[in-house]
């Protein structure tokens, strides 16, 4: 269940497989909001993945330059690998000309989504100092709604990874739209909370002087302020924390996004670490689609683990999206975690409600 280990090591093993073992891995991914602060480095990381055949980049502006730029990377994204005398041969023409495609403006949105296996949505405005994620609702709710409407019509079977904030509301918005369109599959809709896990792993490894690759902290709840709840008692390897350490680490993980917003002083929020986290989650989704039986990630999804309709927790991913919930994470919580869980519920419930009401008011 150590998602850190599986994410990093499995990808490496694919990259280094010998030519004789090479096989066709050809998944198509669309990034909506691809020219933005997250979209650009996320697209670069995806371009470096050998699991992808096509990368479709959509934005309302500035896509052409990103496509031209990325298209010059001779990274292993490939349409097909043919076997010639036991040697794997890359389709270079495809690599140079077709692997990355650009789509600009609503008229080209549907084309960007045709036949894709995974849709990643980092479109929308980021926070500035003093703003909460909820302050983004008025702009980003409409953006996510519009994008998911077209996704529902064009790629109803694709997995969807929602990055746009406030994730606590934008995921329920996406679910309502998919329901209205009659194509909602709760196993395929994900709010990306991987950055909370990445931060928790980084901060805990640093604090306890552990190797980064060994640390995995499940983070549950949602993706804003106190709704972000790292379960330090369930960290791997088993780690002893003092009460003070637990409080300080929890608050730091919850406020880590604000740390970046303040450091950037008006120039936006986390983009590079988010691109890294988004690429890791996307790769996990693709590995699961590809039949890897050992893919675990935390994500904010429709859930029955608590009385809340959406909740982030550790999941086992499979060929059809969510395969199972890791129920054990919510058992035997410490008193601190139990109290924090109860404390986050009203805020998370209100954010979910706000998203659902937005869609129902609009329609
Ligand atoms: P950005 O402003 O740099 O980029 C956003 C991009 O979205 C721009 O290229 C813009 O043209 C595009 N866009 C706007 N309206 C669009 C539409 N209707 N269709 C397609 N694209 C559209 O913002 P940044 O820094 O990339 O952040 C994007 C979102 O990700 C924000 O909502 C931010 O709060 C969120 N975020 C989420 C995190 C998470 O952990 N889930 C972490 C960090 C940021």
Image: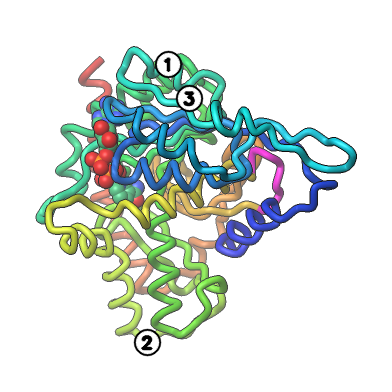
Residue 333 lies, in percent from the top left, at 45, 69
Q: Which residue is drawn at 15% across and 43% down?
A: 135
**Residue nearer the viewer, 295 or 351:** 295
Residue 165 visible: no
**Residue nearer the viewer, 278 or 87:** 87
The image quarter in which residue 122 lies: top left
| Mark 1 or mark 3, whichever is nearer to me | 1
C-alpha distance separating marks 2 and 3:
44 Å
| Mark 1 or mark 2, whichever is nearer to me | 1
C-alpha distance separating marks 1 and 3:
18 Å
Find out whether the residues at labels 2 and 3 contact each other: C-beta distance under 8 Å.
no
- Give the overall secondary structure of the magenta segment: loop
In this rendering, is residue 15 above or below 355? below
Find out whether the residues at labels 1 and 2 contact each other: C-beta distance under 8 Å.
no
Secondary-structure class at tag 1: helix
Find out whether the residues at labels 1 and 3 contact each other: C-beta distance under 8 Å.
no
Instruction: Find the magenta span and give its range.
Output: 288-294
Mark nearer the N terminus (1 vs 2)? 1
Residue 43 lies, in percent from the top left, at 44, 41
> Which residue has dot 2 on it?
242
């Amino acid at each position: 269940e150590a998602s850190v280990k599986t994410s990093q090591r499995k990808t490496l093993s694919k990259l280094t497989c010998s030519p004789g073992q090479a096989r066709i891995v050809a998944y198509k991914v669309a990034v909506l909001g691809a020219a933005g602060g997250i979209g650009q480095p996320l697209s670069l990381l995806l371009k470096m993945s050998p699991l992808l055949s096509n990368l479709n980049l959509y934005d309302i502006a500035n896509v052409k330059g990103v496509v031209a730029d990325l298209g010059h990377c001779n990274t292993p994204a490939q349409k097909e690998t043919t076997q010639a005398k036991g040697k794997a041969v890359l389709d270079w023409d495809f690599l140079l000309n077709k692997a990355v495609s650009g789509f600009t403006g609503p008229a080209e949105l549907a084309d960007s989504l045709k036949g894709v296996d995974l849709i990643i949505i980092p479109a929308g405005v980021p926070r500035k100092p003093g703003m909460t994620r909820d302050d983004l609702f008025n702009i980003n709710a409409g953006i996510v709604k519009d994008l998911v409407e077209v996704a529902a019509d064009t790629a109803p079977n694709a997995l969807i990874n929602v990055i746009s904030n406030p994730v606590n509301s934008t995921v329920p918005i996406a679910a309502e739209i998919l329901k209205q369109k009659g194509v909602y599959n709760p196993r395929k809709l994900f709010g990306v909370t991987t950055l909370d896990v990445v931060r928790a792993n980084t901060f805990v490894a640093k604090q306890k002087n552990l190797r980064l690759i060994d640390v995995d902290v499940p983070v549950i709840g949602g993706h804003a302020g106190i709704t972000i709840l790292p379960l330090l008692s369930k960290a791997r390897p088993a780690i002893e924390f003092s009460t003070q350490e637990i409080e300080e680490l929890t608050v730091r993980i919850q406020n880590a996004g604000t740390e970046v917003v303040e450091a950037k002083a008006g120039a936006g929020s986390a983009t590079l670490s988010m691109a890294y986290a988004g690429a890791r989650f996307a790769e996990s989704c693709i590995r699961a689609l590809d039949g890897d039986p050992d893919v675990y990630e935390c994500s904010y999804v429709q859930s029955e683990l608590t009385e809340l309709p959406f909740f982030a927790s550790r999941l086992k991913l499979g060929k059809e999206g969510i395969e199972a919930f890791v129920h054990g994470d919510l058992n035997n919580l410490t008193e601190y975690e139990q109290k924090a869980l109860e404390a986050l519920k009203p805020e998370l419930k209100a954010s979910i409600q706000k998203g659902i009401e937005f869609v129902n008011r609009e329609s």
